[in-house]
Amino acid sequence: VFQDKQIVKIKKVNRVIIFTNLYPRFHNQEKIEVICTLQKPEKIDNFNYPRYLEIQKIYGLCLYPQITKLKQKDVQAKTWFSLTNLRQILAKKIDYNLSYNEASLAKAILLGFKQELSTDWKEKFAQIGLAHLLAISGLHISILGLLILEFLLFFHFRRQHVFYLTSLLIWLYIIMVGAPVSALRAGLMGELVLLAVYLGRLNSLPQAIVFTASLMLLFHPELFWHSPGWQLSFLAVLGIVYLFPLMKKLFQKIHFQTKGIADLLAITLSAQLATWPLSFYYFSQFSFFAPLGNLLILPILPLLLFSLIFVLFLSFFFNFPLFWAIPWFFLHYILQITELFAKMTKGG
């Protein structure tokens, strides 16, 4: 830490937020040296920013420091870096094949890159209660898990092995996106949903949810009152438990024939219905237009994730630009609906 023209060596420090330029890029597990003057966070208007950071064990801000990249010697760290570096490779493929706004949205939803999505677009998503769409949430993990599960079953993998392989791929995905605390919590919640759906025992899931939530609160009791991400993930899973059977019956009544897609849509809508009130409380003013916007966007999420993963996988073997038209269409649709209903919400 650089302070009063002296370099102070500290063996153990609390977490800090570093504000720096977008370039050069640094990746997980890279070793860097940071020199700056630590500053205390201050309140922003009526928002208790210091308290918000304290919940995440962050007690200092580091504004535009001097950063030096150090040599990498640890073999294990290099292996971890190789896995997390895949995220950068996928981001470059998305940038190369999609227009700017669509690419920014795709990277936010699939890879957890929210930095390149403009503030204007972030505000629009917040206005219609879809700010959580831009983070790796329990809903994301549940959808991804079910996509993988259905894919493996479609190709006749042994059912007793499918769940374990799916779980492994999900946790590798969480590591790939940097394993932030929010994604780890989402992974745990999503894993519960995946297990219950796989076993066909959603009715036994509430006990597991209560146990998991209690375990989390035992170590971090502040999550209950001060962590919107944890609250939304918890409500999303409860929504899946209690609303998913009803939504599934609804799709059966309207003769929705494709079982895998029907389950994904039912889970998506169940989670969204359960989190609507809290989403509006945290992210936007209530508007009668926002729920309709959500209903038009959320069912697209499973199709978007599937098409993105599919074309990214194919791009490692050959790159056929026409294939990218499918995820572009879903991304463009989401952006257009978001813009339309954000204007209606603001006007209403």
Image (cartoon, rainbow, N blue to C red):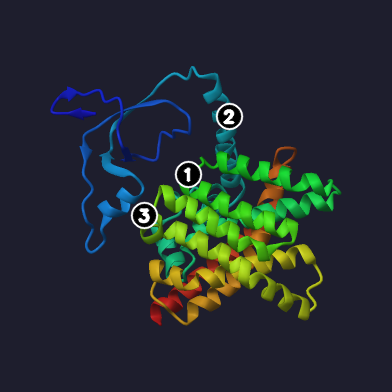
> Which residue is label 3 attached to?
222
Locate residue 91, reporting x and y percent: 56, 43
- Name the N-terminal-most of marks 1 and 2: 2
- Disc assigned to residue 331: none
Which image quadrant is residue 189 in?
Answer: bottom right
Camera-side mark, 1 or 3: 3
Image point (54%, 68%), residue name: 336
> Which residue is label 1 attached to?
180
Locate residue 195, reporting x and y percent: 68, 54
Query: From what the image shows, is residue 308 above or below residue 62?
Result: below
Disc 3 residue type (three-letter): Glu
SS under mark 3 = loop
238 left or right, relative to 181: right
Image point (67%, 45%), residue name: 167
Image point (26%, 40%), residue name: 63
Disc 2 residue type (three-letter): Ser
Between the residue at mark 3 and the residue at mark 2, the CA separation in whole angstroms equals: 35 Å
SS under mark 2 = helix
